[in-house]
Amino acid sequence: MKMDLSAIIEQMETGEQDTALTALQSYTKEMNQCFTFSREEERERERLGELVLGFLNRELQPSCQLACLETLRILTRDKDCLDPFINRSAMSTLARYAGIAVASTATHAHSILMEGQVEGEGEDAEEVSSELMKGASPPSESPDQEVIVEALKSICNILLHNETGQVIAADLQLIKGLSERLKQCHDSTWIHEVRFFDLRLTFLLTTLRVDVRAQLAQELHGISLLGNQLDVTLGLCWPDTLETARAGSEDVPLEELSPLSREQIELAMEILKILFNLTFDTARRKVDEEEMAEYRHLGAILRHCLMSHADGEERTEEFHSHTVNLLGNLPLPCLGVLLMPKVQQASIEYMGVNMDAVNMLLKFMEKRLDRVHKLRETLLPSLNLLTESGRIHRETRKFLRSKVLPPLRDVINKPEVGSALRNKLVRMMTHIDTDVKDCAAEFLFVLCKESVSRFVKYTGYGNAAGLLAARGLLTGSRDSGIYSEDEDSETEEYREAKAHINPITGVVEEEQPNPMEGMTEEQKEYEAMKLVRMFDKLSRTNVIQPMQLSMDGKMREITPDDLQNLTHNPVFQPEEPGSEDEA
């Protein structure tokens, strides 16, 4: 049955609260699950929005407030009918009901109301301006949290669909009102939905507005604020500096703790997404000592996130994904907190260090590697994080190498063939996506301490050539690195086969017959010149671009003049034009 908007509008225009309440409740019941709207009734929906906003600027009974805001939540889903809501007065009204309006914007809102920009009669405008002048207080002394949630949802819808709404939200300083309520994270009176949509709105503001992101990070101390929020959400205690545990379960290993609740996971993931926005530019700017301390504290909480799990594998992986993304934004020196916890009985120990978090990262990365699809988005954050951790922490690099590049025994199968983690990563070194290819090669190169010979040993020269060429290492010299000296252990199998391994493929191959066997020196030279002329022809027609290794170890183009010099042969005359085509 189609909803008759005209009838609802007529009932709203009577101005009677009880009549409006009945009409709006029937509308929200019918349209609650509607997310697509027809174009025929756009004007009616806009008119309904204007009337509802007019009602909200009056003294209303709580049930009517809720019905009005539920209606706005539905109407703001329609991105083509947002005109009544993308003005300062409408956004101020919604912010007031959401409890996040700030006093500094009240004067400006009052002047707009006096200019007659709010639908309704003059006395209504006076009432709403009086309310706004009260500052950040919600519409009533004992706020109806359902009302707050509906107002927050409406603001989220507006920001999601409309740039003008985003500008007004930033101008109204909604982030300040949100920050004030986020500071009340220890107050158990706020229901889950209020906390969740406070965070969702903060995420949208920091995603869509660079100025709001900077304001929250710097002026409002967002890293500390959100770090405390995450701490409280996860129910943490701190047995030692930079070492976390779940309050009340300090002696229980992290792996044995019960799953985090659905509500905890929802809040934690929103917090992680906001923190990701705030730390997005960390690598591009200088971080002072005070910020570094905040990031280390945050890193310890993120380690706890990494070792915690949700109720269900899919939810756990999503939670860990947000954690890994944020860890990748932290300054590199802060990654040492992953190794800080003491070694416990159930811990994975390597060189006297707790490797639980690193092992979890490695398993997470391998899961993403197995999926193949969307590797740039899913694999690279964890792969980059492991690469940088291995580069700056000797224990991490050695542990990773023991897992990824154990002593080489298989000299029969090519490095890219097989189901071991090394084989999977070597396959990625020839992936069609350049970023995936480069990151996989970089990870293995770091595990090899940036030693060309060791890198070629584990991957084969053919797979390694891309990275080596990019770094000017094709001549075999070693790149600069910050690695300790240690022995590269060789297995008995590798030592026996070493002399017979083809360095290009990285494996022992069956002996192939020599194609030049039985040829005279003149015949060999003839075939060589024929090949050069073929290269020259393909080069001149831009089918290929021949390259050669220069003295600095980097590749450079072979010019037509270079090829001409190679083809100059005083013994043999050039072939007839037709014979080249036959070749």
Image: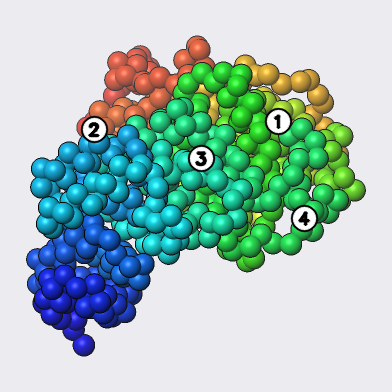
Question: What residue lies at 45% left-to-right and 61% top-to-bottom?
Answer: 145
Figure quadrant of residue 136 = top left
Amino acid type, residue under disc 3 in the picture: Leu
Depth check, mark 3 against mark 1: the one in front is 3
In terms of depth relative to the viewer, which is nearer, 305 or 147?
147
Q: Which residue is mark 1?
A: 336
Closer to viewer: mark 2 or mark 4: 4
The Cα atoms of the two marked residues, 2 and 1, are separated by 54 Å
Left-right relation of 8 to 97: left
- Asked whether, in this view, residue 204 is left or right of residue 404, the answer is left
Picture residue at 23% right of the left edge, 57% below the top? 57
Q: Amino acid under label 4?
A: Glu
The structure residue drawn at horizontal position 33% and vertical position 68%, both measured from the top left corner, is 61
Residue corresponding to mark 2: 541
**How packed is label 3: few (under 14 Cα within 10 Å), some, or many (20 or more)?**
many
Element type at mark 1: helix
Amino acid residing under circle 2:
Thr
Q: Which residue is mark 3?
A: 275
Q: Residue furthest right?
A: 345
Query: Secondary structure beneath disc 4?
Result: helix
Marks 3 and 1 sit apart, C-alpha to C-alpha, by: 19 Å
* Disc 2 packing (10 Å; few <14; some 14–19; many ≥20): few
